[in-house]
Image (cartoon, rainbow, N blue to C red):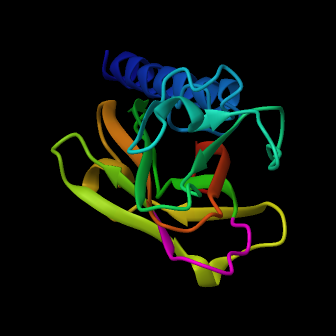
């Protein structure tokens, strides 16, 4: 009888591990359900705000191209004091280890003005953590990928149940050069 209980427990643990494994495989290594990570559905899932023009934040217009596909998020670059933001609440599966945020950024060189981009994540209890910060001095030639580990908050390290989190990209400044963002994913620990 006790051997039978052991088999049932093993089967239950194996089924849970299989379900988590299938989730990761289905999501191509993702641990979070970020909707429209490459902005190809014109920002479906993302909430875009701007003190200048909210409809221009997620776009396919020049002179800047997307990293992959056609659309990208373009924050700032209005040439006057402004604040642009994209954010998304998403589902996060329980994981073992520390997931990472992966995203691509292009920061065109700016000869005038100042600008700052803050990347943050908020847990389901409302605590906000800074993940990465960019300024004028961080300009790039073309697109560059960043992989940032999530903070050592218990919700992001391992959890017995799924939960939600919110990812936030905020740009402020008066520069004529924007911050460009594309291909945003949460990836499983390696």
Quadrant of the image containing the N terminus: top left
**Hey, which residue is sitting farthest front in the picture?**
80
36 or 9, which is in the foreground? 36
Q: Residue at x 46, y 49 (%)?
A: 96
- Across the whole image, how many numbered discs are drawn on residues? 0
Q: Quadrant of residue 165?
A: top left
The part of the image, by quadrant, that contains residue 135 is bottom right
| 104 on left or right of 130 | right
Question: Residue 178: where, in percent of width, then height?
Answer: 62, 59
Q: In terms of secondary structure, what is the magenta stretch mainly?
A: loop
Q: Would residue 164 be counted in the magenta stretch?
A: no
Q: Can you name the residue that lies furthest to the left here?
A: 125
Residue occupying image coordinates x 83% and y 33%? 69
132 w.r.t. 76: above or below: below
Span of residues in magenta: 107-117
Give coordinates of residue 61: x percent, y percent.
77, 36
Is residue 109 shown in magenta? Answer: yes
Q: Who's the residue at 79% across and 43% down the image?
A: 66
**70 or 126: nearer the eye?**
70
Q: Is residue 54 above or below residue 65?
A: above
Q: In percent of the image, x 76 and y 73: which residue is there?
A: 140
């Amino acid at each position: 009888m006790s051997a039978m209980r052991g088999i049932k427990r093993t089967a239950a643990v194996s089924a849970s591990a299989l379900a988590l494994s299938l989730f990761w495989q289905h999501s191509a290594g993702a641990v979070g359900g970020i909707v429209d990570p490459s902005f190809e559905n014109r920002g479906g899932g993302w909430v875009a705000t701007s003190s200048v023009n909210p409809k221009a934040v997620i776009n396919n217009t020049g002179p800047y191209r997307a990293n992959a596909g056609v659309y990208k998020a373009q924050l700032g670059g209005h040439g006057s004091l402004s604040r642009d933001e994209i954010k998304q609440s998403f589902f996060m599966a329980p994981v073992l280890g520390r997931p990472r945020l992966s995203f691509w950024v292009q920061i065109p060189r700016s000869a005038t003005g100042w600008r700052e981009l803050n990347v943050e994540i908020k847990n389901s209890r409302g605590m906000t953590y800074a993940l990465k910060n960019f300024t004028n001095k961080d300009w790039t030639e073309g697109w560059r990928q960043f992989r940032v580990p999530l903070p050592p908050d218990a919700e992001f390290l391992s959890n017995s149940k799924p939960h939600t989190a919110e990812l936030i990209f905020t740009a402020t400044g008066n520069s004529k050069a924007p911050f460009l963002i594309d291909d945003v994913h949460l990836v499983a620990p390696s």
